[in-house]
Amino acid sequence: MTRVASLCLALLPIERLRQAERSVRPRDVQPVDLSPRLPGAIDDNPGACSVPRGGGWRPGARWARDEQLGDRPTSEQIDALPSHQRPTMRVLGRRSEAAGHPFRAMPSDDGAPPSAPLLASNWPSPQQRPTILVLRTGQRDVVTSVCPLAATLGLRPGMAAAHARALVADLDVRDAEPDADRAWLDRLALHAVAHWTPTASVSGPDGLWLDLSGAAHLFGGEERFCRRLLRFLRRIGFTATIAIAGTPGAAHALARFVGASMVILPPGCETEAIADLPLMALRLQPEALEAAARFGLERIADLYPMARGPLARRLGISTVERLDQARGTLAEPIMPVVPFEAPRVERRLLEPIGTAEAINQVIGDLVDDLVSVLQARGLGLRTAILKCRVVDRSDQRVAIGTARATRDPRHLKRMFAMRVERIDPGLGIEAMSLIVPRVEDLGAEALLASFGDRERPRDIAPLVDQLGGRVGPDALFRVGAVESDVPERGVRRLNPTAMPVGWPGWKRPARLLNRPEPLAHVVALLPDHPPRRFNWRGTAYHVVAGDGPERIHGEWWRRPGELWAVRDYFRVEAEGGARFWIFRRGDGVDAPTGDLSWYMHGLFG
C-alpha cells in the first residue's frame, strides 16, 4: 500500500530571509563609557553593598534578620537591585513562589491537538511592516510571496509590484531568491532521506514529497510522524502544512488547499477527498485553467462526469493525466534525491569483443574517463566494479579495492589487468561500465622540503594492492602495539598502509606465537638461569647462549588469577643458530607465582 506525504512550506521565501537576517543581526550591546578618566578622579563611593562592614554576619545573611532590619524588602525592591546584589533563594529563606524544576522534561512532539495550527514561534507581530518579495519578469516586477500581514491587506502573489505599492504605502519590498529557496529545499530533502524516509523529492518551489510506505510505523504511526515533522519545522522557524494520501497528486492538493495543518486521508478515498477542491489543486497549466474558466469548470468534481476524449481536446491531455494521477488510476513516480551519486563511466561497443587485448583496451579507456571524473570532483577511488554486458544479456562483474584512495590511471589499469582472466566473454561483450561505489576525498598533498640527499620514502600502497590482488586482501597486515604488559596482548593487526607507533624499547621476537606452546624435558638451574636443553615440537635443542631473565607480572586488574602470576623470559640461542624466546612460569622461589613450567613464545630472525 502506497502512502505519500506532501509537505507544504507556503511561506518559505519570507521565513528563510528572516532567518538569515536574524542570524547575522548583532546582539544588543549596552553602551559603554569610553571617555578617558583623569588620574585624580577616584570613585570613593562604590554604591550600596550587601556585605555589612565591621559585622560578624556572612554576606547576604542580613536579609533574614527581621528583628534587626525591620520589615523584609518587597519583591519590587529586590528586582530593582543590580544582579550581583540580589539575594539567592537560599538566602531569602522559604519563599512562597514556586521555582521551575531544572530537570523537567521538554514537551513531547505530539503535544498539540490535531486542529491546532502550528505557526512559527518567531513570526513577526502585527506592528511590523508588511513584507513582499518581487521577481523581475520581462519588463515588470511581479510579487512572488507575501507575508500574512500583507495578505490581510489585500496583497497576493502574482500581482504587479507597482500595484502592491499603490495599495499599501508602508511596504517592505525585497528581492526574491528562488535559487536559494531551492537550495534550502534540497538540504531539507537530504535531511529527510537521512532521518525520515529513504525516498524524498522536492515537489515544486514550496514543498517536499515523502514516501512513507513501510516507514511510518518507525515513528509511531502517520499521525505521530506528522506531529514530529511539524514540530521540527516550528523549532527552526518555519510554518508548514502536511497531508498524507495514497497518491502524490492527492497529497499535494490536500496539503495546499484544505486549510488544515495536518490531513491524513484513509486509503482509497482520494476521489471523494479532492472533489470539492479547485482545479488549481491538480497542478494544471495556466492555459488549461483559463480554458476551464471559459467552460465554467471550477471544481475537480466537475471533471468526473466528462468523457476523456472531449476533456483532452478542451483542456489538454496533461489535464487528464493529472486527474488520473490524483485519483490513483495512473502511476506518478517520485524521483528521489540521491545524497551521493557514485562516479560512473560507460562504453557501448559497435561490435562484440572477446579477446583479452580488446578488453584491456576498453578498460584503459574507461579508466581514463573515470580519472577525469574523479579529478573534477576531488575524489579518490577505494573500490571499483567493472560490469561487462555479454551478448546473451548476462553480466560479468570484476571488482578491485585499493589500500589508499588513488586516481593513478597506470595503477588502476594494472589492477584490472590482473583480473581479466576472471571475465568470461561468452559470445562477446557489447557494453562495459565502470562504477565506483566507495570513494574518499583526495586533495593536494604537501611535500616536505629536503635540502639534503635524503629521498622521500615511496608509497607502498600500490605494492599492497598488487600483492593483495594475488594472495587476497586479508593476507596482508602490519603489527601494531597495544598498551599491555602481557606480550600476547600487546600486539594487534593493522592495515598494511598504517604506520605503527608506540613500540616498546626492549627487544621482541620477529614472530610471536598466537599461544605459548609448552616445552618438554627442560634442564635449567633455578632461579635465574636459562635452560641448557629442551624439546619443542618433537625436536631436541641444546642451548649454547642465553640472556635473561626479563620478569613480567600479570595484569591483576583483568583477572584475579593474575594477581601473583610471574613470567621470566629468556632469549636463548641453540646449536645451528636458531634463536628463541622462552619463559618460565613462576619466579622459582614462591609457589603462588607459578608452577615452574616452560613455554615457547616466539622466534627471532
Image (cartoon, rainbow, N blue to C red):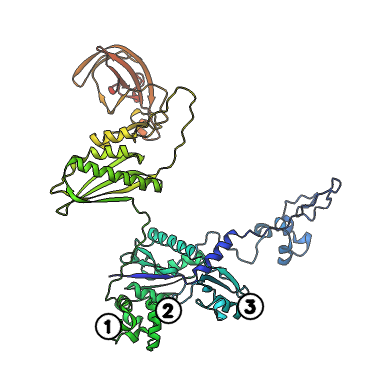
Which badge, 3 or 2, comes first in the chain's sequence? 3
Tell which of 195 and 284 is nearer to you. Answer: 284
Q: Residue at x 50, y 76 (%)?
A: 157
Q: Give the numbered dot on residue 169.
A: 3
Disc 2 or disc 1, which is closer to the eye? 1
Q: Give the numbered dot on residue 257.
A: 2
Give the amino acid type for the residue marked by disc 2 in the picture: Phe
Tell which of 125 and 380 is nearer to you. Answer: 380
Q: Give the numbered dot on residue 593.
A: none
Give the amino acid type for the residue marked by disc 1 in the picture: Arg
| Secondary element type, mark 2 | helix
94 is higher (above) or lower (below) than 403 = below
Q: Position of residue 74 (x, y in %)?
A: 73, 66
Q: Residue at x 17, y 52 (%)?
A: 394
- Report the number of discs: 3
Crowd band around label 3 with a 10 angstrom C-alpha radius: few (<14), some (14–19), many (20+): few
